[in-house]
Amino acid sequence: MKRFLIVLILGIFCAAGAVAQKVTDAKALEYAKECYSQGMQIEQAVKTLQSKGVSIDQMKRLKAQYESGMLDTDDLTSKQNKEKSNTRQMRTTKQDQDAKEKLAIDSLVQDQQEIILDEEPQMTKQDSLNRIYGHDIFRNKELSFTPNLQLATPGNYVIGAGDELGISIYGASEVDLSQTVTPEGRIFVSGLGPVSLKGLTIDQARTKLRRELSAIYGGLANGTASLDVALNNVRSIQVNVMGEVFAPGTYTLPSLATAFHALYAAGGVTDIGTLRTIKIVRNNEVAGTVDLYEFLLTGNNRGDIVLQDGDVVLVPTYSALVAVPQGVKRPMRYEMREGETLDALVRYAGGFTNDAFRTALNVTRQDDMGLTAFNVKEPEYASFAVADGDRIVIGQRYQRSSNKVTIEGAVYNPGTYAIDDNVKTVKQLIEAAEGLREDAFLDRALLQREMPDWSLEMESFDLNELYSGQIADIPLRPNDELYIAPKVDMREEYIVTVSGPVALPGDYLYAEGMTIKDLIVKAGGLLESASLVKVDVSRRIKSPMSTEFSPVRSQLFTVSLGEGLMMEDGKDQVLEPFDQIYIRK
């Protein structure tokens, strides 16, 4: 149980800007217990705590106290229940209960670990296709929809009880008034009396106050003074968020809050809730409908309705979900309103990818008789209405090239080239690749080609004969692949080996003309214990034309080194590939 409470305290990441009421620490923990007993997910529980007035600062403080050992959740809850005399017994009982609940709590914490740590979980392609576009917006820690209380008061803001109005008169008369609207919707102006502003917008209140105050401030009547009205401090309102949200209930919000803010406070929309037809019910009538796709796709939040006290934000179930698994830039499921077409769906999904086949789409639809397929041509996209459960299959464009050729190997600029006016033959392709390298193996070049039935064939030719004119230049065909082997790739890697008392014994790359002395120097020189007498050299016996197996694979000869590591006759022994040198002690 403790772990659950602390996870909730760690939930400060989901603050949606709701106005906090004063709640004791013990009461906050009691609310947390209620959330646990109801089986709420962590995110839902945090939203519920916030709606009950647990402030963000209070969550931070409780978290810090717990981590420092100053917070005892058992003690706080026992105080709340006025059972101080039984504290020790309660703790023992709770420890037993904690042990029983541990597995369930661990599982719950594990499920929410990515959210608590503010980390994005790794998402597979299948996960992406199961997602519904737009449902993640209320789980984004960077986007809380918290109303900006520092902006100028909107003219359509409806004044209510608790609002603190700043009334400024400037010009011939200079007056600053600050008045709080009473529960009856009035303000009291000295020398004038009560002025009712109930149900008026800021613009309407400005007009009425100019008319009323002109009786005591003559400048307002003759135009030599001006009047302005703004909110000095906003009131709190209560709204109900109902329907398909994660934490339905009543929320206390700033009076500038909108439908987006209320939805965020309620944890967002569930998988069966709508983002397209969210209703704002006011005085038992629908005051407006919110479509989040307009905001998500265009950034236009004009449809986000400012809430009033007592409003109900109602989230019905979705009308239609349509899946687009491939061929679009955002492959996932999309909520569609009645009558919306394929054209709108593709637009919501970010448009086609560059490899999508756009001429026709296939739509698979479930009905009472089973699955029905539709082949929809491009001109019909704007008129073909999608239905709930539709799956849109977008094919890929034809991938075979009509003029591509490739050259690899011993040329200076290998890669892909186009068959055009300058590149039509093998020789022209080699010239386009900046010519042959010096290490090119000229005796045999390989040209892999596609047959009319897409099977492969291989043509080989001698580049010496091609360049000398003994054979005709070869015309290129689409998808030809020309390979000119480098000589170094045509042979095994040559090495020589030195062992014994040298600084760095081991294998070394062979170089033409390398001697024993060169190899010893490359190996860091001889150690003090090295003997210059009877240096053994083992050399492979190579007979590539032999037709019989020989048990003798190498020959061994011995040399003695003298001054300067030279042989006794003053010469240096030239090595061959794969020679093995052994220095004695």
Image (cartoon, grey):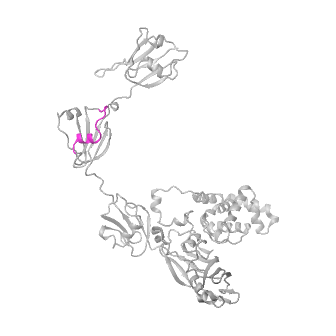
Q: Say above or below: 175 vs 326.
A: below
Q: Say above or below: 24 vs 204.
A: above
Q: Nearer the viewer, residue 554 or 145?
A: 145
Q: Which residue sits furthest bottom?
A: 215
Left or right of 443, for residue 67: right
Left or right of 307, for residue 494: left
Q: Say above or below: 339 vs 409.
A: below
Q: Is residue 436 magenta?
A: yes
Q: Quadrant of residue 165?
A: bottom right
Q: Quadrant of residue 459?
A: top left
Q: Position of residue 41 (x, y in %)?
A: 60, 64
Q: Which residue sits furthest right?
A: 85
Residue 413, can we see it? yes
Q: Position of residue 552 (x, y in %)?
A: 37, 17
Which quarter of the figure is the N terminus placed in? bottom right
Q: Position of residue 493 (x, y in %)?
A: 38, 28
Magenta range: 424-440
Left or right of 228, for residue 571: left
Residue at figure coordinates x 33%, y 70% from the top left: 381
Q: Quadrant of residue 106?
A: bottom right
- Say how many tags the image has: 0
Q: Nearer the viewer, residue 581 or 93?
A: 581
Q: Nearer the viewer, residue 427 or 371?
A: 427
Residue at figure coordinates x 63%, y 66% from the top left: 46
Q: Is residue 260 magenta?
A: no
